[in-house]
Amino acid sequence: MFKLTLAWAALAVGVLAGPELHAQTAAPAPVRNDYADPRTWLCKPGRQDACAIDLNSTIIAADGSTRLHPFKADPRPSIDCFYVYPTVSNDPTPNSDMNPGPEELSVIKQQFARYAAVCRPFAPMYRQVTLTALKAGMLGKPMAVDRALGLNDVKDAWTYYLEHDNHGRGVVLIGHSQGSGVLIQLVKTEIDGKPVQAKIVSIILGGARLQVPVGKDVGGDFKSIPLCRSPDELHCAINFASFRADAPPPSDSLFGGASGAGLEAACVNPAALGGGRGSLHAYLASGAETIAAGADAETPRAWTDPPTPITTPFVEVPGMLSSECSKDASGKTYLSIITNPNPGGKRTSEYVGDVVIGGKVQRNWGLHLIDMNLAMGNLIDDIRLEAAAYARSAH
């Protein structure tokens, strides 16, 4: 089981925490980042940067056999992807600096670099609320964070991208946790109902809450952007928060609930946009690494019996996992992750991804650590079909 320090258990608090974690103090306006500086970007096309890494995977069949699956980037993608990463910074300050550490590099590897298979990658650095600040708040010692700072950074990066890099191309927005929260605010103020919305191929928001009217696909947080219900639907949003099917959201869940009458948390299944159950094409870390790269972790269990050495950073486990959107009696909506039986036992049916504190699984977090890994292949396939639809609509 994956073990986390208290700080790592706060991964989504940048989106969900109360105001005690976001106290403001009077201070001079911070200097704005210059996104013309290449150092302000973790990933941009055509560079040797955080996205230019080993992304090969090992396919592990149910019978325990394995084969290498080399990663191939699209040499001429027709669209772009713009990514905002989750809460990962271990900087000692309330807001992070603009110097990428191993945690920012790790999250790019786990959540974003593979999208180069279908789009040009853009991933700006931003001065997010740090894990240090989140931990302090959870311990009753809040730090004076500036929540608007990171949002304004991302707005500046987005504006720079549109003015200097977009050149009329379609773009997919991708975020997770705090990154999804920032993107929701960006879309509300800069995109929803504005001409630039025509360039948005889709919006992928993992590990956060996007609200819609109960039983509806449009309205709520976004006024004119519906939920995606078909791979060739454009200008739409995919939102989900994942939980094991045998460990659904408890009453104190941090995900799945709504904050207003007549609203519910959206759930779109990346493996079946139109609804129902679909087979997940996961890219799981071959070891114990998740987006919580610095956390204490037990030695990972073997993927096969007998154990087979895995030398790639990712594994694929076809047929092992499925997903469907579910709603419980209290109205919480979530992406239910089903582990399919494997009677032969040659491939494990166990995988890491739970938040664990003091040896106890924190069920109210679900599978937040691996939201994006679980559906990575499905999301890439969805984007590939959306890109084709966008090309047809644009011409």
Image (cartoon, helix red, strand yellow):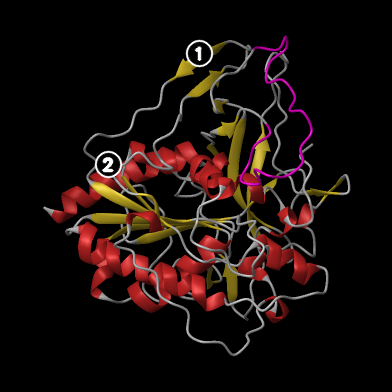
Vertical order, 209 against 340 (above or below): below
- Amino acid at pointer 1: Arg
For label 1, the residue is: 67
Comparing marks 2 and 1, which lies closer to the viewer? 2
Q: Secondary structure at mark 2?
A: loop
The residues colored magenta run 288-308
Q: Position of residue 12 (x, y in %)?
A: 65, 61
- Amino acid at pointer 2: Gly
Neighbourhood count class around disc 2 (C-alpha, 10 Å): few under 14, some 14–19, many 20 upward: few
Q: Which mark is residue 46?
A: 2
| Residue 195 within the segment the image draws in magenta | no
**Magenta part mainly helix, strand or loop?**
loop
Return the disc, 2 or 1, that comes first in the chain's sequence.
2
Locate residue 224: give its quadrant.
Answer: bottom left
Q: Position of residue 302 (x, y in %)?
A: 72, 20
Pick whichever, 10 or 255, lies toward us. Answer: 10
Q: Seen in the image, is 300 located left or right of residue 237? A: right
Q: Secondary structure at mark 1?
A: strand
As drawn, which residue projects farthest toward the left? Answer: 395
Vertical order, 343 against 367 (above or below): above
Quadrant occupied by the N terminus: top right
Neighbourhood count class around disc 1 (C-alpha, 10 Å): few under 14, some 14–19, many 20 upward: few
Q: Residue at x 73, y 16 (%)?
A: 345
Q: Residue at x 74, y 55 (%)?
A: 9
Q: Residue at x 63, y 11 (%)?
A: 63
Locate residue 114: give its quadrant.
Answer: top left
Q: Distance between the Cα atoms at labels 2 and 1?
A: 29 Å
| Residue 305 within the segment the image draws in magenta | yes
Locate residue 91: give its quadrant.
Answer: bottom right
Residue 315 visible, this angle? yes
Residue 277 visible, this angle? no
